[in-house]
Amino acid sequence: MIKSLKKSVNHIFLLGYLAIILFPFLFVLFSSVKSNNAEISSNPFGIPTTFVWDNYIKAWVNAKISTYFFNSLYISILASITTIAIAALASYAITRMRYRKMSTFLFQFILLGMLIPGNALILPIYGLVRKMNILDTHWALYIPYTAVAIPFSVIILAAFMRSIPSELEEAAVMDGLGPFGIFTRMILPLTIPAMVTVFIVNFLGNWNEFLLANYFISTDELRTLPVGMVGFRDAYNTNYAQMSAGIVYSVVPVMVIYAVLQEQIIDGLTAGSVKG
Amino acid sequence: MDKTLRKPLTYILFVLPALILFIAFFIYPIMDAIYYSFTSWNGISKNVKFIGIENYTTVMSDGEFWSSVKNNGYFILFSLFIQVPIIIIFSLLISNVKRLRGLYKTAVFMPSVMSTAVIGILWGFIYEPDIGLFNQILSVFGVEKIYWLSDKSWAMISILITNAWQWTGFYIVMVLAAILSIPKELDEAAMIDGATGVQRAIRITVPLIMPIISVVIMLSIAGAMKAADIVLVMTKGGPAGATDVMATFMLRNSITSFKYGFGNSIAVLIFVFTLVITALYQFLVARRVERIEY
Amino acid sequence: MKKSLVMMLTLLFVATSLLAACGNSSSGNSGDTAAGNNSKPAEEKKVEPFELTLRHTQLGEAKKNRFAILEDAVKATEAEVDGLTIKLDGVDSEVNRKEKLRGEMAQGNPPDIFDAFGSPDVGVYAKEGLVLDITSILEELGIKERFGTSLDPWTVDGKVYGTPIGGSIEGYFYNKEYFEQKGLKVPTTIAELEQLAEKIKADGKIPFAQASKDAWVPLMTTNNLWAYTAGSDFTYGFKKGETKWNDPKMVEALAKHQEWIQKGYYKKGELGLAYGDQRNQIINGEAIMMFDGSWANSVFLDPAQSGDMVGKIGFFLMPPFNAGDGYSIMQDSNNGYSFSAKVADDPQKLAAVKSFIKNLYSEEMQIRGLKEDGLLPAMQIPTEKMNEAVTNDLMKEIIGTLADVKYKWPAFDALVQADVNTELSKEIQKMIGGEATPQEVLDKVQAVQEKANASE
């Protein structure tokens, strides 16, 4: 009896927190079916009187959300996967191959990347992308996205790989596997939980990335979702209703991915910590 | 064994892709910024004039730069003394319930997946003085209207609250992972000894998750030093520069004014300050909690 | 405790990177040393196909009419010049202005035709020899005189480096329905305007909608006030050191603006509101008048944005202090097209540019801009012709006010250095927030002005 009472106290606090978190989303949902700005601004948190589902259709079709959506989706996924592949190779070399000094140096070097303020780097990166002659193509996002996520991916994957007991490896060597074989057959499968975590975080970062996407892509058909959303928020005229519908489109996929993979994330983190 | 794992060519091939991308997108740009911080370059001209440390002396003697540094400091203090306790409490609460745990975990994370531009618009409505959520709630208690974003004394705290709203859930998920990884036996043993839930939380769980708390603090510091977009979308550094942080101060005083060299000196300072503060934290605090190797 | 260590690092970097990934919405500032260039289309001598890139910023729903006009001018140009293809490259206005174009300029490689802001931007580019001097082209086409003062922001040392897309003026939008109900009349002097404000305030409404999160919004009012107290030419003198910001006449203007703030003519807390909010104050009826640019008219014509306020909004200019002094207004023409200096090396491209200017700056196109886009012509067009073209009442009213105008001037930010604008923007917010007096504001701005003048 007392125990269940305690539990309900917990739930009351948690539900309170949930309300704070979710209220603004409610605003987005309400606004997304309101007819115009006046209706939103006169009573932002009011329940809509009419339901204008049209906003969703308009946002999807007229505002090309569908195009932006798929651009964002495939760039985010591809870049995240590439980062993981490259970072996994490097992490493996750094943690499992016998070049202790070199590896320590490389690891420290890459660690430095975590402290460099991203805000300042856009123009040099622009110059780079321009030199590669890939401006205004999806390569201009794919390569920087892949690169920018490398330091943390290396660090997190390295931490996981370091925790793998070397006995396993010795057995693999006995079986006649080379470094690449050990990497693909043994290390990779064991690192999957960590990879899921890295994937989610990279994916989120890429999915919401605005600055490079806005800057490097000028052809409308190639734009990504955050840029398309800001398209609604034109400097002088704002269409809050359609924008809210756009927000819903941009939030739902990541929430679904997170909801599906969240157990994996937690497991991944847990596995890493226990094995260490 | 060692022979198998000592193949120079394989090592180089494995490391090279990551290294190339890292140098191209991190090291080269920061070098570039350092180089131009010693010039009066306007971002356009072919003549790049070296002016020594003049940019640095100018910015260091600017009172408004230091007030923006102070605002970065508020970001750090707010997360240390407000956000961190909240994170701990709610992580403990979630770890303690079985029912609805999935819902809580998913829901608290939601704000962290939204782009900051969108969050700015959303919270603009919440802080709206007349019809905004906050003032409507306050008016129930007879509190007078607060002009959240336009009153100098409230603007900064408003930004901090929004920032906390965006990121607290993310940290909760992190800390929760740590709590859930604690072996059940420890908790059960304490339960047999008759410890209450609160006692168990304080004596067993919290000490065990101290490393992760330390991480959260580190992250808050790093995040605080880089903060810019949340300020831009909420107040643009206003009113009258009251909410400027280093990064927004840099943007305002470089881009539109064609002072790229000057702006770069601020970028370098942000980098240096971040290094110093994280190093200080490592040596003064983190070491006592948990030695961080590597 | 090594296991927690692993996890700790793991998590540390998970989140740092997320923060980093999410935390860079604003732009960078460092130099661009890249030397490589996109190879431009080869420059053929004969009438062989050649390409011209045109950077525009007419993206999105709100600018679709303006884009259609541009497209037609492009088509006409392509038809006129043999072998020409114009490649359209659309970029968001802010991105183009602050990042993309600057990056390209730093590499000495802007698009052949590009959207730009006259002052200070094009001025800086022109000094580096990156922008085509089009003075002779305009003279040849015989249209230079028709632009009048709207070329001022585009002129450096007597040479013209670009042409404005259109013009806009600033004045008061007001709730006509309310005026009629209360028997209020459009003011002809500042004193009358103040009486109006007093009455509206007594009625429990906000006299003036204003949203000062971006300082240029309140500065529209301030600028117009000082054009009256100090004179319409006064602003030109700051850069030359001939006039001073802290002149008593300037103080008078700021003091007037401050007086209005102190009397509660503006919404409390407007310092934190974004620009779009001042339209909302008019649309939902809480405020009655709003000082804004004529470009705002499209908002009040669009039912999706203005609801049932469509058709109930009127427009008048800020009146002079004394009746009969003549109206003095800002006429903005700072956004337009400039051309790469490299065009001059290629006779084919030069001819194409000339044809483009001819096609975009015809009377027909200017009237189309007015009719379809609500954009006032950058060139002088007879009022009757404008009236013929316009069908909605609000736009007619805006055009109608032009006949009363005696003095026109560009906004101050087109006439002073960017640093000065940055300083004034910050200080005016302080004044609105009650933290600085007009004298203090202007003393500080003058100090920055002197420093900026000295470094030129």
Image (spheres, coloured by chain):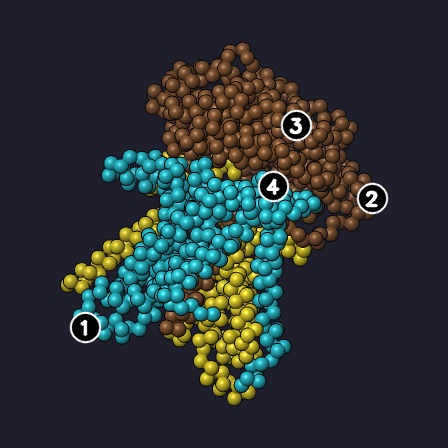
Tell me residue A222's x, y (percent): 59, 52
Disc nearest the viewer among 2 and 4: 4
Chain shown brown: that is: C
What residue is disc 1 on?
A: B193
Q: Residue furthest right?
A: C46
Q: Relative to residue C204, is residue C83 depicted above or below?
A: below
Q: What is the spatial separation of the Cα atoms under label 3 and label 1, in whole angstroms?
A: 85 Å
Q: Which residue is mark 3?
A: C152
Tell me if residue C31 comes above or below residue C61 in the rendering. below
Residue B286 visible to the viewer: yes
User: Tag 3, which chain?
Assistant: C
Residue at mark 1 to residue at mark 4: CA–CA distance:
69 Å
Q: Secondary structure at mark 2?
A: loop
Amino acid type for the residue under numbered disc 1: Asp
Q: Quadrant of residue C401?
A: top right
**Which image quarter: residue C113?**
top right
Residue type marked 2: Val
